[in-house]
Amino acid sequence: MTDWSMLAVALSGKFLGIEWHTWKVIGWVGNVCFFSRFIVQWYASERRQQVVIPSAFWWLSLSGCLCLLSYATFYQRDSVFIFANAFSWIPYLRNLVIHKRSKRASRACVECGIRSPAQASYCADCGTFLRDTEKRD
Ligand SMILES: [Zn+2]
């Protein structure tokens, strides 16, 4: 940003037409979290060439939800906006717990390192037999 544009921001109190303060930053962080989660999910799916929902998706969902709920509750005080975010954190948190439990129970392939469900006999990625003696981490 040039000195002139910084001066314009300082004089008007606005940047990109938005008047910035702490609650606006929290609200926009929530929006950025929600927006970026679809990019994270899309990237993970393209990388694996199958539909994947990584734990980062749920962390971004939870973070975005809590930021927007705080913004709606303490700044906007808008009952519609509050209700829209009041309960969505519950499945996000539950999915994080389930994700952690399934990851803990999964088995890493000694050939490719890809994790498979605990009940799998063969690696879904390379087909290597998953022995019971494999290291679990
Ligand atoms: Zn493998």
Image (cartoon, grey):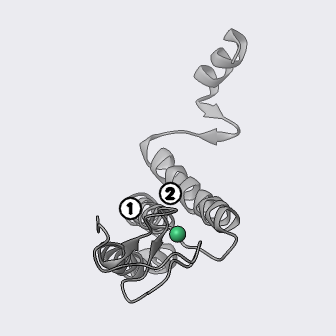
Quarter of the image that includes the C terminus: bottom left
Residue 5 in the image: x percent, y percent? 71, 18
Disc 1 target residue:
70
Instruction: Please tell me whether mark 1 or mark 2 is closer to you in this view.
Output: 2
Residue 107 in the image: x percent, y percent? 37, 74
At a point 36% along the width and 73% down the height, the residue shown is 103
Kindly indicate the quadrant of the structure image that contains residue 127. bottom right
At a point 40% along the width and 79% down the height, the residue shown is 95
Q: Residue furthest bottom?
A: 119
Disc 2 target residue:
30
Judge by depth and name the residue closer to the eye, 92 or 51: 51
Q: Is residue 10 above or below residue 16?
A: above
At a point 49% along the width and 66% down the height, the residue shown is 114
Mark 1 residue element: helix
At a point 58% along the width and 30% down the height, the residue shown is 13
Mark 2 residue's CB less than 8 Å from ligand 1:
no
Q: Do tag 1 and tag 2 residues touch (Cβ < 8 Å)? A: yes
Q: Which mark is residue 33?
A: none
| Residue type beneath disc 2 | Gly
Mark 2 residue element: helix
Judge by depth and name the residue closer to the eye, 130 or 89: 130
Quarter of the image that includes the N terminus: top right
For residue 45, side relative to residue 110 (left or right): right
